[in-house]
Image (cartoon, rainbow, N blue to C red):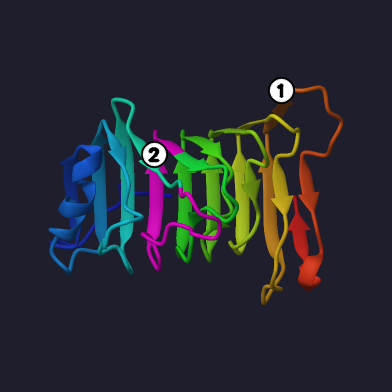
C-alpha cells in the first residue's frame, strides 16, 4: 500500500515510540486523524490486552532496531482485535502468533505485511484484502490459514514449516463471493523430508477460490 501520498492537513500523524509506548501514543492522537504512522523504535508491541483507538483509521507500524509485535495468546480462539475496522500495515517487523489455533488479527478491514517475519500460525487475517510482500514465515505447524480475508496476495515470500504444511485454505462459513488467491515467486521449505502440497485449497462450506 502507498503510505507516502498527500494527506489533508490535520488528518495525518507520525509518532515515534518504543514497543510498550505504542498503545498510549496512538490513543493520544487527535480523533480527526485518519492515518497514523508509528515508528516503533525497538521493543515489543502488544495491543491485544489494551483498548486502542484504531477503528476506521490507517495504522502503519514501521519497525526499527528489531521491533516485534506480540499477537500470541494462551487460549484457542482468542485473536487480536486491535485493528478491527482499521487498515493495518506492518513494515520490517517480527510478528509472533504462537501455536494456538485461531490467532491473528480479527475483523481488520485491510492487512498488509512488508518485509516482515511471521512466526507461528496465523489464522485470522482480516475481513478485506490480506497482502504479504517479501515476508518470511516460520512455524511448527501451518504458517497461515486462509480463514477470514476476502483475498490473499503473496509476493516474494519464503515459507518454512516443520510438518511441510504451509497455507491452509479452510473456511467455516461460505463468503459472499469467490476468494482471490495470488501466489507469486514464493519458496516453500520443510525442515523434515515431506512430500505435501504447499497450499491446501478446500471447498468447505461451498467456498469458491480464484487461484492465480
Residue at the far bottom in the pictured view: 176
Residue 98 on the magenta span: no
Image location of residue 53, percent across then percent down: 25, 64
Image marks 1 and 2: residues in contact by CB distance under 8 Å = no
Q: State the image coordinates of residue 181 (x, y, percent, origin top left).
A: 69, 54
Residue pictured at 62% horizontal, 59% vertical? 151
At x 74%, y 33%, the residue is: 163
The answer to whether 124 appears left or right of 44 in the picture is right
Measured as percent of width and height from the top left, residue 73 is found at 46, 50
Residue at 74 percent across and 39 percent down: it is 165
Alpha carbon distance from label 1 to label 2: 27 Å
Q: Position of residue 60 (x, y in %)?
A: 32, 49
Residue 26 relative to residue 173: left or right? left
Q: Main secondary structure of the magenta part?
A: loop
**Secondary structure under badge 1?**
loop
**82 sits to left or right of 211:** left
User: Disc 1 vs disc 2: which is toward the camera?
Assistant: 1
Q: Residue at x 72, y 59 (%)?
A: 170
Q: Which mark is residue 136?
A: none
Q: Which mark is residue 91?
A: 2
Tally the marks: 2
Residue interval drawn in magenta? 73-95
Q: Secondary structure at mark 2?
A: strand
Nearest the viewer among 48 and 209 is 48
Residue picked out by circle 1: 191
Say which quarter of the image contains residue 76. bottom right
Q: Residues within 10 Å of mark 1 (few under 14, many from 20)?
A: few
Residue 142 quadrant: top right
Q: Residue furthest right?
A: 195
The earlier-in-sequence mark between 1 and 2 is 2
Q: Residues within 10 Å of mark 2 (few under 14, many from 20)?
A: many
161 or 35, which lies in front?
161
Amino acid at each position: 500500500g502507498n503510505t507516502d501520498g498527500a494527506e489533508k492537513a490535520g488528518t495525518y500523524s507520525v509518532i515515534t515510540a518504543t514497543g510498550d509506548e505504542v498503545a498510549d501514543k496512538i490513543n493520544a492522537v487527535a480523533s480527526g486523524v485518519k492515518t497514523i504512522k508509528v515508528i516503533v523504535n525497538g521493543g515489543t508491541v502488544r495491543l491485544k490486552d489494551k483498548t486502542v483507538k484504531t477503528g476506521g483509521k490507517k495504522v502503519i507500524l514501521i519497525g526499527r532496531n528489531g521491533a516485534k509485535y506480540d499477537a500470541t495468546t494462551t487460549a484457542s480462539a482468542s485473536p487480536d482485535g486491535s485493528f478491527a475496522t482499521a487498515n493495518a500495515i506492518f513494515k520490517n517487523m517480527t510478528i509472533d502468533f504462537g501455536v494456538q489455533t485461531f490467532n491473528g488479527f480479527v475483523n481488520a478491514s485491510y492487512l498488509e505485511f512488508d518485509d516482515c517475519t511471521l512466526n507461528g500460525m496465523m489464522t485470522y487475517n482480516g475481513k478485506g484484502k490480506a497482502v504479504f510482500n517479501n515476508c518470511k514465515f516460520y512455524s511448527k505447524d501451518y504458517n497461515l490459514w486462509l480463514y477470514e480475508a476476502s483475498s490473499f496476495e503473496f509476493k516474494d515470500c519464503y515459507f518454512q514449516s516443520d510438518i511441510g504444511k504451509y497455507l491452509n485454505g479452510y473456511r467455516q462459513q461460505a463468503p459472499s463471493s469467490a476468494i482471490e488467491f495470488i501466489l507469486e515467486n514464493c519458496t516453500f521449505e520443510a525442515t523434515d523430508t515431506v512430500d505435501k502440497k504447499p497450499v491446501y485449497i478446500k471447498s468447505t462450506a461451498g467456498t469458491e477460490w480464484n487461484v492465480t
